């Protein structure tokens, strides 16, 4: 990952933007793409700064990505209501608010916040604390679309706000939310993909993408509960298809023995039910887990074998995929 490639990725994200689909396929819609592009490039830039190799003008770049997230990236979330925080009208989506909160946490963590971003950080955290006091697992879209994994960025953001700003209310709300996610993971059927407003499973079957997503974000906030999700992911969904002969790993989207459908969340399913989406997110989850460093290395080997290099050579062509991959290879607990 070079400075030039990151700058090319930034130009695409802040210019033409990220297409609302995975791997350029119209049949795999992903309307949150612009938000994720803004946020994950922000995370990469913050981590580079924390590692002592910041890109030139990192504070300006972070502000530009935040402005984009506060602007056009709101579009898919806006129809479902909003509320102002520090003068910014923001969608109510827990996925949207969690991502923005983490972007602000990154700026604070890297010492690149200013008065305006800190005010928004505090206001958005307080808004989430209040919302969670009324309903602990919140929707991403509308009132009934509740994917528990989408609460993981908000949980991480609240924990980080509590730590970075010395805020006991944020820390407590983040802990309550993490505890609820762990409770859901302990259900006899496992961590449900979707629940109703009362937390009752609507789609009870666990999925590797939701486990990897939740484990990775909780690990960003250094929460020990991350292992609940990452351990299950690796133990129950990830394999070494070539056994001990080759150092490759891949993760299936659905539980072993189940032939589930392919959709935009899972990404393409390849031979054996292995999921490109689950395997990609597992790269981040295993990097953030001290226990699974060898799995991380083997997942990277498989990604290279499957042709990730062509995507990274032209990050402007598949900006979301490049951002997620580079985040997965650079992420550390904040």
Image (cartoon, grey):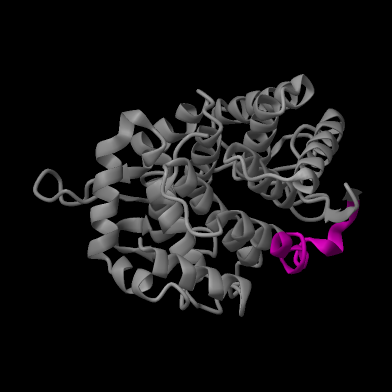
- Residue 268 seen in render: no
User: In the rendered structure, which segment of residues is drawn in magenta?
Assistant: 67-83
The answer to whether residue 34 is left or right of residue 275 is right
Picture coordinates of residue 182, whole percent (x, y): 59, 26
- The question of residue 71 being in magenta is answered with yes
Picture coordinates of residue 173, whole percent (x, y): 74, 26
Q: Which residue lies furthest to the front in this view?
A: 56
Query: In the rendered view, would you say 168 is above or below 99?
Result: above
Residue at image location 54% in from the left, 68% down from the top: 10
Number of numbered discs visible in the structure rendering = 0
The answer to whether residue 70 is left or right of residue 108 is right
Residue at image location 62% in from the left, 71% down from the top: 14
Query: In the rendered view, would you say 329 is above or below 179?
Result: below
Picture coordinates of residue 31, whole percent (x, y): 66, 67
- Residue 306 seen in render: yes
- The question of residue 262 being in magenta is answered with no
Q: Which of 26 and 329 is in front in this view?
A: 329
Query: In the rendered view, would you say 291 is above or below 115?
Result: above
Q: In which quarter of the image is residue 32?
A: bottom right
């Amino acid at each position: 990952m070079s400075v030039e490639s990151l700058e090319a990725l930034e130009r695409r994200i802040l210019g033409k933007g990220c297409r609302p689909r995975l791997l350029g396929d119209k049949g795999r819609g992903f309307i949150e793409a612009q938000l994720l592009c803004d946020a994950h490039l922000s995370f990469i830039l913050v981590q580079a700064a924390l590692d002592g190799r910041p890109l030139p003008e990192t504070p300006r770049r972070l502000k530009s990505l935040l402005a984009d997230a506060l602007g056009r990236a709101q579009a898919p979330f806006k129809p479902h209501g909003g509320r102002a925080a520090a003068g910014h009208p923001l969608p109510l989506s827990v996925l949207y608010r969690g991502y923005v909160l983490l972007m602000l946490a990154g700026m604070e963590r890297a010492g690149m916040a200013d008065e305006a971003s800190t005010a928004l950080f505090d206001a958005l955290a307080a808004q989430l604390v209040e919302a969670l006091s009324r309903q602990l697992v919140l929707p991403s879209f509308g009132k009934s679309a509740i994917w528990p994994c989408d609460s993981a960025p908000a949980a991480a953001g609240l924990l980080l706000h509590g730590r970075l700003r010395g805020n006991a209310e944020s820390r407590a709300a983040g802990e309550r939310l993490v505890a609820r996610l762990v409770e859901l993971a302990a259900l006899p059927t496992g961590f449900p993909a979707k629940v109703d407003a009362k937390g009752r499973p609507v789609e009870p079957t666990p999925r590797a993408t939701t486990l990897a997503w939740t484990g990775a974000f909780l690990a960003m906030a250094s929460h020990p509960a991350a292992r609940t999700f990452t351990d299950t992911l690796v133990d129950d969904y990830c394999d070494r298809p070539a056994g001990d002969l080759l150092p490759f790993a891949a993760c299936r989207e659905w539980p072993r023995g189940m032939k589930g459908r392919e959709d935009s969340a899972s990404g393409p399913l390849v031979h054996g039910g292995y999921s490109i989406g689950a395997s990609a997110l597992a790269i981040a989850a295993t990097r953030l887990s001290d226990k699974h460093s060898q799995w991380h290395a083997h997942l990277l080997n498989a990604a290279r074998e499957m042709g990730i290099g062509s995507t990274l050579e032209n990050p402007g062509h598949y900006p979301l995929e490049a951002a997620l991959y580079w985040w997965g290879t650079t992420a550390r607990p904040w």
